[in-house]
Amino acid sequence: MDKKTLRKEIRLLKAQHTTEELQSLSDEICRKLLAHPMVRHAPTLLLYWSLPDEVSTPNLISHLLEMGKTILLPKVVSDTEMTIHRYEGTASMEVGSYGILEPCTPEVRLATLLQETASACLENANNSDTPCIVGIIPGMSFDSNGHRLGRGKGYYDRFLSAHPYIYKIGVCFPFQKKDVIPFDEYDVVMDEII
């Protein structure tokens, strides 16, 4: 099955679920994320503001803010690039590309942020393997080897390739997981899937 066909299949599967069913599945995934050691110990998390057919993130983001985490969200700035911005509440969001709510705060340079948070990262870590930034990454489908099928524009693959130190947790509904999905050499592999 090629990527285009799989995306179509996933859209059809999503359409078979009610908003309430998707929210219930989202709540379970978010509970797992909030209990995850990497999420609990990382001072900074890269998330996404969810579309209606994705694992819902607004409540997750609120919980993580209450835990004192720095939350970063992407903003699409061209046909090929996204930038990262600090989340400072819904008042700092506006509808951007593809109808997605995006932050209108200044762009964050991850290298600078890592320098600023290095001491907090070391203090919060149980061991040296805990990353300073954990990414919660959406996808159309994931497979058992960590391959991710996105929506086809390559924003996340380009960004994550440039920032390989981010620990990548792919999130999707159970029916989006496949044993094997098509992938290319430039597709970034997730560290784990929830």
Image: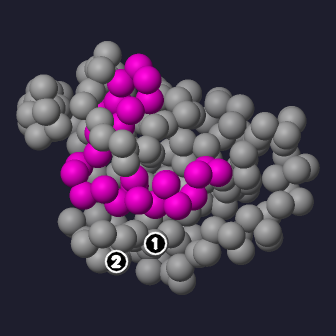
Residue at 28% across, 64% down: 100
Q: What residue did someone put label 2 on?
A: 77
Tag on residue 50?
A: none
Secondary element type, mark 1: strand
Residue at 45% across, 72% down: 83
User: Residue 98 in the image: x percent, y percent?
Assistant: 21, 66
Secondary element type, mark 2: loop
User: Residue 111 in the image: x percent, y percent?
Assistant: 68, 70
CB atoms of marks 2 and 1 within 8 Å: yes
Disc tally is 2
Packing grade of label 1 (10 A; few <14, some 14-19, many >=20) is some
Query: In the displayed structure, would residue 152 be above or below residue 118?
Result: above
Residue 131 shows in this picture: yes
Q: Residue 163 lies in what quarter of the image?
A: bottom right
Q: Can you name the residue that lies furthest to the bottom here? A: 106
The magenta-colored residue range is 141-166
Q: What residue did someone put label 1 on?
A: 83
For the residue pair 183 and 169, the one nearer the viewer reads as 183
Distance from label 2 to label 1 (Cα)?
A: 7 Å
